[in-house]
Image (tube, rainbow, N blue to C red):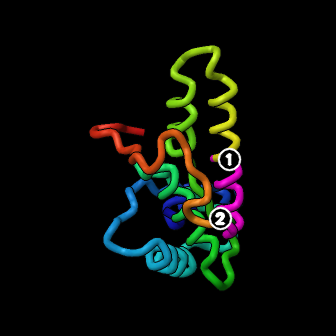
Amino acid sequence: MVTAGQSHKRRLRETVPKRDDPVSHRYSPEDIAAATVTALCRTVPAAVCGVTFLSGGQSEEEASVNLNSINRVKGNKPWTLTFSYGRALQASVLKAWEGKGENVPAAQAELLKRARANGMAALGRYEPGTVTGTAGNEGQFIEGHTY
């Protein structure tokens, strides 16, 4: 990606690479985070401003835990590491709302909970399991979904 961007005269400071593969469940979030950060350190120049991972059908909790684990990895990470949450941020909100006006306050409360959890995860300070949502640990994978 970096080589292709450079050959097309892209400015790395304005590039946010995204990876959209679902996270494997064969390894712990800490193992995945360590391997991810190691790979990024070996391949992504410091001039890249950030790396954004798609939540890839993970549940809200999985996405928060994985982001938290990535940001807890020790060492120099010259870029911001985050998730593009989409469904993993909206699932509990939409479930609470159900398209009904009277459910707006409950939906807003769900959004605020997830936003706080993910804000803490972006700092590596989220405590897994401390934020529960209406969608719980439901995976957000949709067969055949394209981005």
Q: Specify few, some or many for label 2: CA neighbours under 10 Å numbering under 14, 14-19, or 20 or more.
A: many
Give the camera-side residue of 32 and 105: 105
Give the camera-side residue of 142 and 11: 142
Q: Position of residue 100 (x, y in %)?
A: 57, 15
Q: Which residues are magenta?
A: 114-126
Residue 39 visible in the shown view:
no
Is disc 1 placed on a helix, strand or loop? helix
| Residue 147 as seen in the image, left or right of residue 105 | left
Give the camera-side residue of 22 and 131: 131
Residue furthest to the bottom in view is 75
| Residue 16 as seen in the image, left or right of residue 28 | right
Is disc 2 placed on a helix, strand or loop? loop
Q: Residue at x 63, y 14 (%)?
A: 101
Q: Position of residue 134 (x, y in %)?
A: 52, 39
Residue that carries the numbered disc 2 in the rendered image:
126
Quadrant housing residue 68:
bottom right
Quadrant housing residue 40:
bottom right
Q: Residue at x 61, y 53 (%)?
A: 131
Q: Specify few, some or many for label 1: CA neighbours under 10 Å numbering under 14, 14-19, or 20 or more.
A: some
Q: Residue at x 37, y 74 (%)?
A: 27
Above-or-below relation of 143 to 23: above
Q: Position of residue 71 (x, y in %)?
A: 63, 71
Disc sitting over residue 115 in the figure = 1
Specify the quadrant that holds the C terminus.
top left
Quadrant housing residue 129:
bottom right
User: What amino acid is at disc 1?
Assistant: Ala
Q: Position of residue 42 (x, y in %)?
A: 53, 81
